[in-house]
Amino acid sequence: MKKKLHLHIKNNRAGEAVFRTTPALYRAAARRHGAVAKQVR
């Protein structure tokens, strides 16, 4: 059994958009990278 990855996301609201995430952006990334998303707890 593979170990689950713990992903910590910290938004930088004062910074550039590249450093921000939303639930919708996370879902889109999970769809693009399904194999990795399955390992995230």
Image: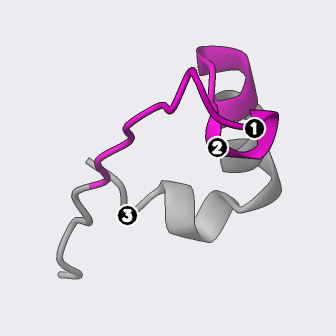
**Which residue bears the numbered disc 2?**
19
Q: Identity of the amino acid at label 3?
A: Gln
Query: Looking at the image, which is closer to me, 32 or 16?
Result: 16
Cα separation, mark 1 vs mark 2, equals 6 Å
Which structural element holds mark 1? loop
Mark 1 vs 2: CB contact within 8 A: yes
The residue lying at 64 percent from left, 43 percent from top is: 19
Which structural element holds mark 2? helix
Q: Taking 6 as reference, is 35 above or below it?
A: below
Query: Looking at the image, which is closer to me, 27 or 22?
Result: 22
> Of discs 3 and 2, which sits in the foreground?
2
Q: Is the residue marked by circle 3 packed among few (<14), some (14-19), or many (20+) residues within 10 Å?
A: few
Lateral position of residue 34 relative to residue 17, left or right: left
Q: Taking 21 as reference, is 22 above or below it?
A: above
- Residue 16, labelled with which disc? 1
Cα separation, mark 3 vs mark 1, equals 28 Å
**Which residue bears the numbered disc 3?**
39
Mark 3 vs 2: CB contact within 8 A: no
Q: Taking 23 as reference, is 39 above or below it?
A: below
Residue 41, percent across and down? 25, 47
**Quadrant location of residue 28?**
top right
Main secondary structure found in the magenta portion = loop
Mark 3 vs 1: CB contact within 8 A: no
Which residues are drawn in magenta? 7-26
